[in-house]
Image (cartoon, rainbow, N blue to C red):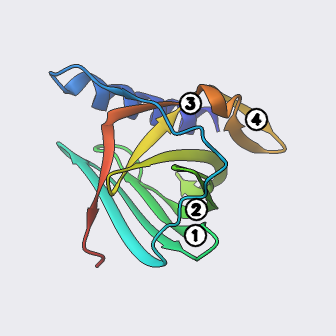
Amino acid sequence: MKKIIAIISIFTLVLVSCKKNESEEIVPNTVESGEVKESVGKQCFELVVNNDTIAMTLNTNSHNEVNGELVYKIYEKDKNVGTIIGNIKGDTLIADYNFKSEGVSSVREVAFLKKAGTFIEGYGDLIETNGKMIFKDKKLLKFDSKMTLSKVDCK
């Protein structure tokens, strides 16, 4: 499990360090009184940087419940393929990512900020609880514009 977290952390650092311009930290909308209505149905998003790809397929219902697939294809690393199940609250998607890497099944929490038809991956300190890696404090999540998944046609 620690190896998987290390691989994902290294991937994030590589992507961040490969860009020449300064990253823009995005702050999620913390207003919870108004509910943001999402499109109902299937949508696909993707980020390609050099030989690395992150692909996400989302099915969203009228209650902002989300399920779908999330794939990390990191050059010269094992591919992580799995499902996500979560909810969109305000402009933030928090989901459980159930995936396999190197033949081992794992679960970790993922976060994405919805902004202008894209999803920006979030990161933060993780702790293990009941066999699952979760964010230590969701209020301290950081969203880096370099990790933006743009909408693409679903295949």
Secondary structure beneath dot 1 equals strand
Label 2: which residue?
A: 84
N-terminal-most mark, 2 or 4? 2
Residue 143 visible to the viewer:
yes
Residue closer to the observer: 98 or 36: 36
N-terminal-most mark, 1 or 4? 1
Label 3: which residue?
A: 141
In the displayed structure, 5 sits above or below 109; it is: above
Relative horizontal placement of residue 125, taking residue 13 as reference (left or right)? right
- Label ID, residue 67: 1
Q: CA distance from mark 1 to mark 4?
A: 22 Å
Q: Position of residue 104 (x, y in %)?
A: 62, 53
Q: Quadrant of the N terminus?
A: top right
Q: Quadrant of the C terminus?
A: bottom left
Q: How many marks?
A: 4
Quadrant of the rendered image containing residue 76: top left
Q: Position of residue 150 (x, y in %)?
A: 28, 55
Residue closer to the observer: 11 or 88: 88
N-terminal-most mark, 3 or 2? 2
Q: CA distance from mark 3 to mark 2?
A: 18 Å
Relative horizontal placement of residue 73, taking residue 48 as reference (left or right)? right
What kind of residue is marked 1?
Asn
Secondary structure beneath dot 2 equals strand
Rate crowding at label 1 as few (under 14), some (14 to 19) or many (20 or more) other CA atoms within 10 Å: many
Quadrant of the rendered image containing residue 13: top left
Name which residue lies at 49% across and 78% down.
Answer: 40
What kind of residue is marked 3?
Leu
